[in-house]
Amino acid sequence: MPPAHPFDDDKLKEECGIFGIVGVSDAANFVALGLHALQHRGQEAGGIVVHHPEHGFNSARRFGYVRDNFTSQSVMETLPGPIAIGHVRYSTAGSKGSTAIRDVQPFFGELSMGGVALAHNGNITNANALRRELIERGSIFQSSSDSECIIHLMARSMGRSIPDRMEEALRKVEGAFSVVAMTRTKLIGVRDPLGVRPLVLGKLGDGWALASETCALDIIGAEFEREIAPGEMVVISEKEGVASHFPFRPQKPRFCIFEHVYFSRPDSIIGGRSVYETRRQIGVELAREAPVEADLVCPVPDSGTPAAIGFAHESGIPYGMGIVRNQYVGRTFIEPTEQIRNMGVRLKLNVNRALIKGKRVILVDDSVVRGTTSRKIKEMILDAGAAEVHFRIASPPTAWPCFYGVDTPQREKLLAATMSEDEMREHLGVDSLKFISLNGLYRAAGEASGRNDAHPQYCDACFSGEYPVRPADMIDQGFQMKAAE
């Protein structure tokens, strides 16, 4: 399948979204709504698994958007029951771009003490080694996903309950994992000891929900209770409520800072902070760090909008919608011929000529990955008659790939891995180019003193090259870690 926008592969692709609920009638309908709110985290495919006391486990897995698949009465009627989990996928492991339906989560397995379904957000950095070992011992894999390793490890465990088996399995797993799982009566949520990927808990009447982000709780009218803590496992049942414990060795949390910059929806709350407010504050920090004389501050929609608002407010330069996005370019668009490809981003973005002409324009975007889209947008702005084009980027230079659940290009394809800031400015052909500093990003995220270099408060490996979990599989394939300074 093509990426969501076949004309733009210049963004880091969101990882996945997970959602689970117990203690409500027609749980699958709530999961479908939750997944709809998490669609920004994965547009390639989605799946739902349910359990009903009479009908047992049932599942539906489909390619494409939630709205196109899980709003159909004929599909939803096959998913009865008071407990369900779901997943929206952008492939970060497995066969990228050519997903088979067997790769679509949640995964289901029948263990000796009953069935279990599992959905995972993140990446297992030792999955190749685990997979080889499991296959040598007789496991038969159905998918190319690293997440399936967890089910096989659970099947081989001698634990006396499914939560016990999950604990044992996850102790063998390295990398990033937020997991929602379900048995016939229990909903289970787990975060890895570093808490790289998000997971939150909500209350809906007598029921409980787990979700990647608070915006998914909002859509079903659930009350946000709290975040699942790094290294925490919660086991939730309709009768007994929430039982919590910490099965892993405690570590200092390293939440993914790019969730603040780009992945999470701006109306979500992370660590008690509004994502929108953090992004607006990034713009404020950018205006302080990299001021420039100009006539207009324009966001590259939509992800650059809050930072552009903050930049304009702090700098006193007027804010304007100099670029307008066509919201209806998606995977259903006409097959891109070479001629249409050459139109590039014009299918998705159009310049507001009347506003731009003759102006010195500051363009605010969330990131520069390969730089291809940035060049095209710059050309469009100049074609519309802009006098100057200045780029301000709401994240530090992305110079290293992510191995914890984000689909990043190989390092040599990342512009910042091969060029200095001045070389990037020249390559993009703009009058100035400035990125927020790593300390500025940390300040915007609420760390008043900036980054603690001895013990960083977040995972920022894509900017710093400092990986909190050694990416064992990638190192085996020849990946060179950053040399110790």
Image (spheres, rainbow, N blue to C red):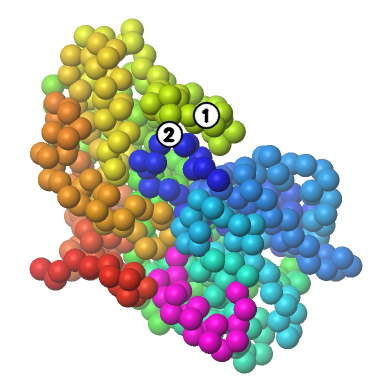
Magenta span contains residue 331:
no
**Do callouts 2 and 1 mark residues in contact (Cβ within 8 Å)?**
yes
Q: Is mark 2 on a helix, strand or loop?
A: loop
In this image, 184 relative to 199: left or right?
right
- Residue at which label 2 appears: 7
Instruction: Report x, y in % for residue 8.
Output: 40, 36
Rendered residue at 40%/23% (across/down): 343
Q: Magenta stretch: residue 137 in it?
A: yes
Q: Which amino acid does label 2 sit on?
A: Phe
Where's the C terminus, which quadrant? bottom left
Residue 67 seen in render? yes
Residue for badge 1? 329
Instruction: Note whether residue 222 is visible.
Output: no
Task: Count neighbours of disc 1 (C-alpha within 10 A) and say few if under 14, some if 14 to 19, many if 20 or more.
Answer: some
What's the CA distance linking mark 2 and mark 1?
A: 10 Å
- Apparent side of residue 287 relative to residue 279 in the rendered image (left or right): left
Viewer-side label of 2, 1: 2
Image spot of residue 403 (x, y percent): 37, 63
Q: What stretch is highlighted in magenta?
A: 121-141
Height in image: 452 above or below 68? below
- Give the image quarter of residue 203: bottom right
Q: In which quarter of the image is residue 160?
A: bottom right
Query: Does dot 1 land on a helix, a strand or a loop?
Result: loop
Left or right of 40 on screen, residue 382:
left
Residue at 16%, 39% (x, y): give it. Answer: 424
Question: Could you tell me which residue is drawn at 83 percent across and 45 percent down?
Answer: 74
Foreground residue among 207 and 20: 20
